Image (spheres, rainbow, N blue to C red):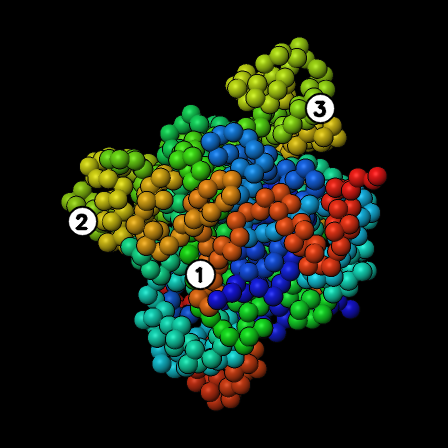
């Protein structure tokens, strides 16, 4: 029998949106917390269960993979239950619906809060105060409540009300100027969303630290997790260099911030081109003279590599353009996986740059059980989803429930948790609170 | 007010970047993190940026940022005396965190099984590149290779070029934050349930299963057999992408989701009225994008990034300026909020770094200690644990000379 999950018995009222918030509550759910998504059948939050509630087939075909690759490229009966951007963040969670804009709905929500440990939200700053759910108000409902707010820029300061997705936070915190190709304009750098990762992990950490303190003292608290500030750590070398030396770091592309060389992505034999996602590349970082010697041996000790200019770390860093050209000439035409194993066997850090469809069958990925099949509602199919990213030796950290469908736990929350009577349940259903579908007026 | 974890003690055997970042998050919130360093020190002490650019083990900016609030104890774990001292420290520890290559701590006789045999309630968290098991368990990795393999690097950059990574060691920091959540989970297992867990955390899985787009590209493939590709050059759509302005750049990613707000921000100009802008998927029409951008550039180039952002905020448009580090350090928002943290250090003077990752109103983040000098707390910590001066000398390799 497996041990109790670490956060078993902790109940989280999850009113988070988009990525950073929902990733954070997913981490809590993975560890065993009962995370209850609060959803409103009459309010559509873009970028939470999809861009649109009811995308047309035309939109699905024209949209990007990340936002519009619905099961079998069809909208299906209830598209909000399987939007590809977000669906996998709903594993291990519960979902219940309530129109909390109404007095009746707000009363239901407050009853749930009264029996919960954590209230977690990342709505636009001001939304919660307008709803009458400030931290002070929550304390009236539940004396030792832990409120986790994950605003973009914090709840104070000149930018408190600025709208932002993860990408905008990275712009403001300096990422966007510091990543990308050294030789292209910044506007070509493309997008990354590391601020979402940090916002989610920081939110989950903050919630657990507050729980830890409450366990010891009985005291709850308000925690603010400003996503912009929380994402600063990923650039720490740039901040520290400025703090120590007043120096602005420059864009390095794939080169190493520590001057390791070679450090790059090199072309390999490919099944096709970038147009079909079939271009193959290998990434290599040499962090020491020993690894350089090992790389030279794998390359067959070519004459160019014995040049004195490459003998030291400083020399390799100073002559990276030449180094990269030679290595690319060597990798081009070789199989990326075969090269990966040869380089690793010799002790050189290297890995293929995987287009994700290739990852599912990788031996290590399979061995570790990274992806496991889950079946979605509405008979739209069974698909391989990712799993929690760590294993505990005694508790069974895994996928207890597949991504939760909208309103799937209404019976549980209303009847079992809140103990509403049959009559009350019917009245709440008639008034629109209890639903499995978004209101028909929402496009 | 003390940090929330002021009743927790962590034995920290991690080095380099991801592991120390995980334990830093705990140390900055009150945990007593005892950093065990080999006689030569954490290899991160050899990583820049250095104060004044000159390498020195006590002037590494990397070590500095990742080791605030920790105490450094030098132990030679290859010796019996070093291991004996570790076991004494174990008696007071709630968690042990390590990131040696898989198998190394077992070979040293201080593996998870041995530690939990001696103290069943302690949790042990191992952080590794690819996990403790499987064919790649001993494979090496860097920020670049891990992001390439398990993160979404393949789809980052432009189509005609090689995939491109994030700045610095961003992917290792992400993994470190993920590992901190695993350590907290294990601490709860011990505290609440009396269960000493062994946790196998891999950087690989923290990227495959993280939220850095790879999750969505994987599901996109599973659902629709569609791949996520690097975008073409100049792929900016209609108010969707990075644009130049009078003094730098601004990003309007996803602003097009609410074209009504963008239109409002631009002052409802005549050129942007008319039914052609309202057609479904108008934002994908190249001719319309070109017409839009021509007018939009003219509007942007007479405004600074601060002015653009202010007008965008006025109309609730998704927008962000691209700031430099210097602009950020001097920015009124972050100054007013007290985000930057000054840390006094014996060798490096006063250094400003990014401060608290979040604001706990009753148990705040606090810098109690500067990053430690190598072995700076060896005697203090081992004495607390009850070791005699002779035992301390033996454990640290400073064997007293015999007559």
Q: Quadrant of the C terminus of chain A?
A: bottom left
Identify the residue position indicated by label 3 in the image. Answer: A294
Q: In this rendering, would B314 be left or right of A436?
A: left
Mark 3: few, some, or many residues within 10 Å (few <14, many ≥20)?
many
Q: CA distance from mark 1 to mark 2?
A: 40 Å
Residue drawn at x 81%, y 55% as measured from the top left: B114
Residue drawn at x 66%, y 69% as measured from the top left: B191
Towards the viewer: B9 or A317: B9
Q: Mark 1 or mark 3: which is in front?
A: 1
Towards the viewer: B134 or A173: A173
Q: Mark 1 or mark 2: which is in front?
A: 1
Q: CA distance from mark 2 to mark 3?
A: 63 Å
Identify the residue position indicated by label 2 in the image. Answer: B268
Give the x, y percent position of residue A225: 44, 59
Q: In this rendering, would B129 be left or right of B113?
A: left
Mark 2: few, some, or many residues within 10 Å (few <14, many ≥20)?
few
């Amino acid at each position: 029998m497996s041990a109790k999950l670490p956060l078993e018995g902790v109940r989280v009222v999850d009113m988070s949106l988009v990525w950073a918030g929902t990733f954070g509550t997913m981490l809590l759910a993975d560890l065993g917390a009962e995370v209850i998504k609060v959803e409103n059948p009459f309010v559509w939050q873009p970028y939470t269960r999809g861009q649109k509630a009811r995308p047309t087939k035309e939109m699905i075909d024209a949209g990007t993979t990340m936002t519009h690759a619905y099961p079998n490229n069809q909208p299906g009966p209830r598209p909000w239950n399987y939007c590809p951007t977000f669906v996998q963040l709903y594993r291990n969670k519960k979902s219940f619906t309530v129109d909390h804009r109404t007095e009746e709905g707000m009363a239901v929500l407050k009853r749930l809060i009264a029996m919960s440990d954590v209230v977690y939200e990342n709505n636009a700053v001001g939304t919660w105060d307008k709803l009458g759910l400030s931290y002070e108000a929550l304390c009236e409902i539940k004396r030792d409540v832990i409120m986790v707010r994950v605003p973009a820029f914090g709840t104070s300061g000149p930018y408190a009300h600025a709208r932002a997705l993860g990408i905008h936070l990275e712009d403001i915190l300096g990422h966007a100027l510091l990543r990308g190709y050294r030789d292209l304009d910044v506007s070509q750098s493309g997008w990354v969303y590391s601020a979402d990762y940090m916002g989610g992990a920081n939110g989950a950490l903050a919630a657990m630290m507050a729980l830890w303190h409450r366990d010891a003292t009985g005291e709850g608290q308000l925690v603010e997790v400003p996503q912009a500030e929380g994402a600063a750590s990923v650039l720490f070398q740039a901040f520290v260099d400025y703090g120590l030396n007043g120096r602005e770091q420059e864009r390095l592309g794939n080169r190493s911030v520590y001057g390791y060389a070679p450090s790059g992505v090199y072309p390999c034999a490919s099944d096709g081109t970038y147009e079909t996602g079939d271009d193959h590349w290998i990434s290599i970082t040499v962090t020491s003279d020993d690894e350089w010697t090992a790389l030279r041996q794998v390359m067959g000790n070519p004459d160019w590599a014995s040049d004195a200019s490459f003998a030291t770390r400083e020399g390799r860093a100073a002559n990276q353009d030449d180094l990269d050209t030679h290595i690319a000439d060597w990798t081009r035409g070789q199989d990326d996986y075969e090269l990966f194993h040869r380089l690793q066997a010799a002790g050189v850090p290297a890995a293929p740059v995987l287009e994700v469809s290739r990852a599912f069958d990788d031996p290590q990925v399979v061995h570790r059980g990274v992806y496991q099949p889950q079946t979605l509602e509405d008979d739209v199919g069974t698909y391989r989803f990712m799993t929690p990213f760590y294993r505990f030796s005694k508790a069974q950290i895994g996928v207890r429930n597949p991504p939760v469908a909208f309103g799937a736990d209404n019976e549980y929350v209303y009847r079992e948790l809140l103990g509403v009577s049959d009559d009350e349940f019917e009245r709440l259903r008639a008034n629109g609170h209890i639903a499995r579908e978004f209101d028909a007026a929402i496009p | 007010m003390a940090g929330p974890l002021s009743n927790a003690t962590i034995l920290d055997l991690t080095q380099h970047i991801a592991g120390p970042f995980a334990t830093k998050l705990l140390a900055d919130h009150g945990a007593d993190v005892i950093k065990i360093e080999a006689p030569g020190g954490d290899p991160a002490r050899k990583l820049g940026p250095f104060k004044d650019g000159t390498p020195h083990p006590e002037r590494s900016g990397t070590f500095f940022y990742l080791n605030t609030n920790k105490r450094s104890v030098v132990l030679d774990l290859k010796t019996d005396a070093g291991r004996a001292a570790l076991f004494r420290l174990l008696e007071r520890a709630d968690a042990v965190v390590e990131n040696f290559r898989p198998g190394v701590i077992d070979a040293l006789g201080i593996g998870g099984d041995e530690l939990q045999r001696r103290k069943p309630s302690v949790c042990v968290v191992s952080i590794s590149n690819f996990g403790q098991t499987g064919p790649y368990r001993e494979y090496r990795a860097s920020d670049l290779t891990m992001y390439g393999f398990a993160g979404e690097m393949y789809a980052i950059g432009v189509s005609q070029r090689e995939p491109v990574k994030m700045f610095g060691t961003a992917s290792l920091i992400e993994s470190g934050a993920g590992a901190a959540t695993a350590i907290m989970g294990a601490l709860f297992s011990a505290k609440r349930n009396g269960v000493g867990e062994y946790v196998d955390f891999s950087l690989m899985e923290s990227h495959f299963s993280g939220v850095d787009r790879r999750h969505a590209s994987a599901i996109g493939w599973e659902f629709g057999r569609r791949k996520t590709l690097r975008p073409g050059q100049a792929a900016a759509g209609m108010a969707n992408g990075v644009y130049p302005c009078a003094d730098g750049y601004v990003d309007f990613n996803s602003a097009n989701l609410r074209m009504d707000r963008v239109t409002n921000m631009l002052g409802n100009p005549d050129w942007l009225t008319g039914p052609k802008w309202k057609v479904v998927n108008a934002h994908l029409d190249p001719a319309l994008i070109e017409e839009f951008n021509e007018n939009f550039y003219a509007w942007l180039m007479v405004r600074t990034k601060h002015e653009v952002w202010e007008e965008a905020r006025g109309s609730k448009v998704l927008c962000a300026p691209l700031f430099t580090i210097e602009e950020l350090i001097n920015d009124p928002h972050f100054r007013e909020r007290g985000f930057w943290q000054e840390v006094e250090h014996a060798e490096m003077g006063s250094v400003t770094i990014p401060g608290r990752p979040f604001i706990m109103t009753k148990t705040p983040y606090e810098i109690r200690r500067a990053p430690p000098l190598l072995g700076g707390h060896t005697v203090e910590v081992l004495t607390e644990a009850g070791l005699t001066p002779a035992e301390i000398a033996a454990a640290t390799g400073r064997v007293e000379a015999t007559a």
